Image: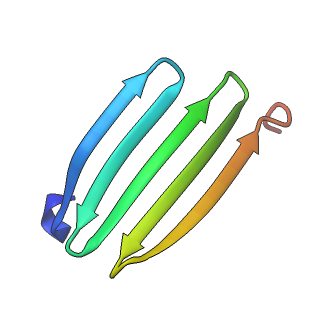
């Protein structure tokens, strides 16, 4: 958020894909998510001081809430 000194540089929604780039000082975060009716796949890459760290998350619906 702007209060924390972060800026959203790009935010795009296209079909079942959402992408964004967020800059917080010297750190840049790039997120790419793909969604279907019952699943998602997200890759978030954080870069700071020339070092990148990627996180890959997937999830799927496993049934009704109880």
Q: Is residue 8 above or below residue 35?
A: below
Q: Quadrant of the C terminus?
A: top right
- Number of numbered tags placed on the structure image: 0
Task: Give the quarter of the figure containing the N terminus.
Answer: bottom left
Q: How is the image coloured?
A: rainbow
Q: Residue 39 in the image: x percent, y percent?
A: 71, 33
Please tell me which residue lies in front, 46 or 61: 46
Give the x, y percent position of residue 64. 82, 31
Q: Nearer the viewer, residue 44 or 5?
A: 44
Asked which quadrant contains residue 34, the reply is top right
Report the residue at 60% width, 62% height from top.
55
Q: Residue furthest top?
A: 15
Residue that appears at 65% across and 41% down:
41
Q: Is residue 31 above or below residue 52?
A: above
Q: Kindly give the residue lying farthest to the bottom in the view shown.
A: 49
Image position of 50 (left or right of 61):
left
Tell me which corner region of the image, top left, top right, bottom left or bottom right, holds residue 11. top left
Residue 65 % position (x, y): 78, 36
* Most foreground residue, 43 or 63: 43
Could you tell me which residue is drawn at 56 percent across and 64 percent down? 54
Report whether 27 appears left or right of 18.
Answer: left
Q: Is residue 43 above or below residue 3?
A: above
Q: Is residue 64 found left or right of 14 in the rendered image?
A: right
Q: Is residue 15 above or below residue 38?
A: above
């Amino acid at each position: 958020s702007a209060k924390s000194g972060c800026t959203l540089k790009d935010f795009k929604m296209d079909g079942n894909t959402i992408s964004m780039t967020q800059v917080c000082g010297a750190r840049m975060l790039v997120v790419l998510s793909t969604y279907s009716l019952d699943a998602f796949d997200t890759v978030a890459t954080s870069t700071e001081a020339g070092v990148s760290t990627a996180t890959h998350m997937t999830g799927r619906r496993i049934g009704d809430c109880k």
